[in-house]
Amino acid sequence: MEFEELLKERLRRNGKRLYHREGQELEFKEQFNLAALADYFRDFAAFANNRGGFLIFGVKDSPREISGLSEKSQEQFEKVDPEKITGYLTGDIFF
C-alpha cells in the first residue's frame, strides 16, 4: 500500500470519531510543542525499530476526533528542520 493510502486508512472515521486506536504503529498527539521534541524522537525511534508507523498531530485523545493544530502549534511545527530528524533515522519520514 502506498503512503497516502495507509494514511487515509489510519484516519478513517466512524462518524466523527477515528476508527483506529493508538498502537505500535500509530500515535496521536493533540498539539505540537517544541518542548516535547525529545518525546517525538522516541516515537520515531520506536517506529523505526519496529515495522514503521505514524505519528499524527491534530487528533484529540478523548473522544478520538480530528481537531487540527492551533496556530501556535502550526508555527512551532514549521520551525522544525526535517533534516535534523531524518538524518538520525533510516526509512521514509514524511512531513
Image: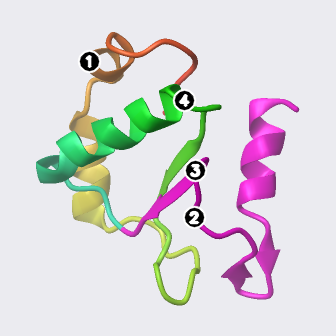
Q: Position of residue 37 (x, y in %)?
A: 21, 43
Please tell me whether mark 1 sits on a helix, a strand or a loop: helix
- Per the rendered image, the range of residues in magenta is 1-30
Up/down of 58 relative to 37, above or below: below
- Residue 36 highlighted magenta (yes or no): no
Q: Amino acid at mark 1?
A: Lys
Comes first in the chain, label 4 or label 1: 1
What residue is shown with label 4?
Answer: 94
What residue is shown with label 2?
Answer: 22
Q: Amino acid at mark 4?
A: Phe
Query: How many other residues sit within 10 Å of disc 4, few (<14), some (14-19) or many (≥20)?
Result: few
What residue is shown with label 1?
Answer: 84
Please give left or right for residue 19 compared with residue 74 in the image: right
Up/down of 91 relative to 14, above or below: above
Q: Amino acid at mark 3?
A: Gln
What residue is shown with label 3?
Answer: 24
Q: Quadrant of residue 9?
A: bottom right
Q: Residue at x 47, y 68 (%)?
A: 68
